[in-house]
Amino acid sequence: MAQDDPRPGKTAKRATINDVARVAEVSKKTVSRVINQSPFVRQDTRERVNAVIKALGFTPDPQARGLAFRRSFLIGLIYDNPSPTYVVNMQQGVLDALKGSGLELVVHPCNRNSPTLLEDIRGFVERQRLYGVIMPPSVSEDEAVIALLRELDCPYVRIASVALDEPASMVVTNDGIGAAEAANHLADLGHLRIGLVRGPDLFRSSAVRSKGFLDALSARGIPLASEYDFKGAYTFESGVEAGHALLSLAHPPSAIFTLNDDMAIGIMQAARERGLELPRDLSIVGFDDLPMAARVWPNLTSVRLPIRDMGRMAAEKLLAPMRGVDAAQLKQPEVRPALVVRKSAIPAA
Amino acid sequence: MAQDDPRPGKTAKRATINDVARVAEVSKKTVSRVINQSPFVRQDTRERVNAVIKALGFTPDPQARGLAFRRSFLIGLIYDNPSPTYVVNMQQGVLDALKGSGLELVVHPCNRNSPTLLEDIRGFVERQRLYGVIMPPSVSEDEAVIALLRELDCPYVRIASVALDEPASMVVTNDGIGAAEAANHLADLGHLRIGLVRGPDLFRSSAVRSKGFLDALSARGIPLASEYDFKGAYTFESGVEAGHALLSLAHPPSAIFTLNDDMAIGIMQAARERGLELPRDLSIVGFDDLPMAARVWPNLTSVRLPIRDMGRMAAEKLLAPMRGVDAAQLKQPEVRPALVVRKSAIPAA
DNA sequence: CTGAAAGCGCTTACAG
DNA sequence: CTGAAAGCGCTTACAG
């Protein structure tokens, strides 16, 4: 394609590092130093080069840079979380942080039960020479995956409800605090017969949320009857099942806390199938604050996690070295879950 | 790093095209021909090279290939759709098709109202030298964006409710068929006073769904009273508003069809705020079949679009040239929306 | 502080 | 059908 390509609508050929070097009358190596923020460039040289970069609208080609660096400018989001809201919010948060950095986000759902999980992740990370990887639960809790990333020398940040790793590669979500708020809320409303529907053991969040809830409850002098303790699967269906189990008891609970919203809404379904009126006959509190929580009737009281912020914080940790800061020292606020009070939990009769 | 790097846990250096060429005793150009499925390679040469590729576990480096090709192996998903379920399902569908192709999916949410929309998309597409772009509504309906992609010579596939482009770059979702099914369902149930809550004009789907619904309704001899015709915004809140407006009429409708589920659930909220019992006092049908539809009470009857399939089909069109087929001739099933009958619509009193 | 040379791992354009 | 040379747009390693 000639310089003066006459094809209509064609944009001019993109400026390269050579163009910048020629116009600024320096070597391309010096331009490269400017791009990479090397301190070994005289101030006036740097300014001249930057002016030319701006005038030519030059942006370095990520492919060429990646080839030379032996590392791409792609961040992988590896996840197995089944909640679309969670996933999309997290992507959004990561993208918030990536804006202007020149990095892009590549999504990579996976299946922890797949026998080819590790092989699959290895291929992805190695082939793309990823700049880094972000993982929400439950992949973030898979030590085999972590070991693999270490072997591949791939930087990563894990998002999880407890500190599973060093601070530089962890965003801890403090789920226990949110669960404690739920406990105190139900206690404040005067409930004494309180049921708990847990998630599967595979998820650390289930243990962490349970502990936060139960500790707060016992601090208020309220015990959990073993017949009120139900293990669900974090699914709507398991919530329905839990609802029927708990509500068919001789002395059913007056309130139920479920460790996620899908199960809370399952409880609602079961209650209605049994002819109960909500919230009069049963108070319910969930965890996640899905958009659905504000849409079901009665509007669901639920614990909200700042998922978008969590994604942003994770990405910022990954970018820290590039910005010359130590990820471990990065000043980031703590993740604070918060109870969103709506109408599904009311004072005990 | 030496060949015999003794660091524990380190993997061997990846094989390159040079390694393959050396072992197979051919030039790297011939290896390149094999990789790129060139017909100008003798059968036995090809087999020998393929054997070595397999033995060495060689996969071509996408960055190097991209640099030489002046085109990356990344597919961009550019979207402004606000529904997380829609977005995640579409991503999943695209990834289904990309599996094994060596391409990766880069997500790029955007805001059609942003003054920098075009500039932003231009930077993304140009900098990453995208292999292609997939767009669901409503970006897919933005002709300025399409003009830009043409200018940049970037292949694209648009997903939309009507054919806005040539077949090779369109997946048409036939929303009208689904809306017609909804109309027939309500007519079958004996409803005569039927309300319609539309979406915003910005979305073609609103016009297409409305037309499908109204045509089917009038074929059954049922007119739409103008006071039963409400323009919503595809949001829950606008559904609540529509519900109050329609239900406060002197002769309120006995059934309402909303052009998406969020608004349908808003109608439910309004009905309850007015003390109505559902579905006894009002039948409701939505569109989208969000996961929420099966979770609200009464479970919402809704039109389902095969979103994951749509994403897969779009990606297959983009991959067609690489696979040596003509995207326009690609044998793909039509997208068929289907009514999912649940409990929110019952026979008219 | 700056630069000329070589290289990252592939493909295009040209020969044969 | 196959290959040697040059190049894609950057960076590393080495000089100075």
Image: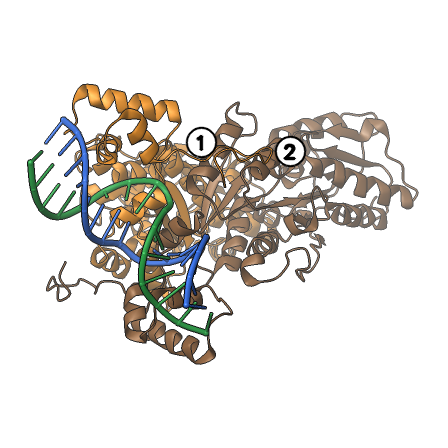
Chain colours: A brown, B orange, C green, D blue
SS class of the residue under badge 1? loop
The chain identifier of the residue carrying mark 1 reads B
Quadrant of the snapshot with the C terminus of chain A: top right
Name, please, the residue furthest toward the right: A221
Label 2 is placed on what type of residue? Glu
Q: Is any part of residue B183 visible from this angle?
A: no
Closest to the observer, A339 or A65: A65
Q: Residues within 10 Å of mark 1 (few under 14, many from 20)?
A: some
Q: How far apart in space, not on screen, are marks 2 and 1 (Cα)?
A: 44 Å
Which residue corresponds to mark 1? Answer: B341
A41 to C12, vertically: above or below: below
Relative to A1, is B205 above or below? above
Q: Quadrant of residue A14?
A: bottom left
Residue B282 shown left or right of residue A223 in the figure:
left
Q: Which residue is mark 2?
A: A143
At label 1, which amino acid type do we have? Val
Q: What's the residue at 51%, 33% (across, down)?
A: B4
| Residue A180 position within the rendered picture, expressed as x and y whole percent measured from the top left | 80, 47
Q: Residue at x 66, y 40 (%)?
A: A260
In front: label 2 or label 1:
2
The structure residue drawn at horizontal position 32% and vertical position 35%, both measured from the top left corner, is B18
Residue located at (33% from left, 45% from top) = B64
The percent coordinates of residue A347 (x first, y second) are 81, 48
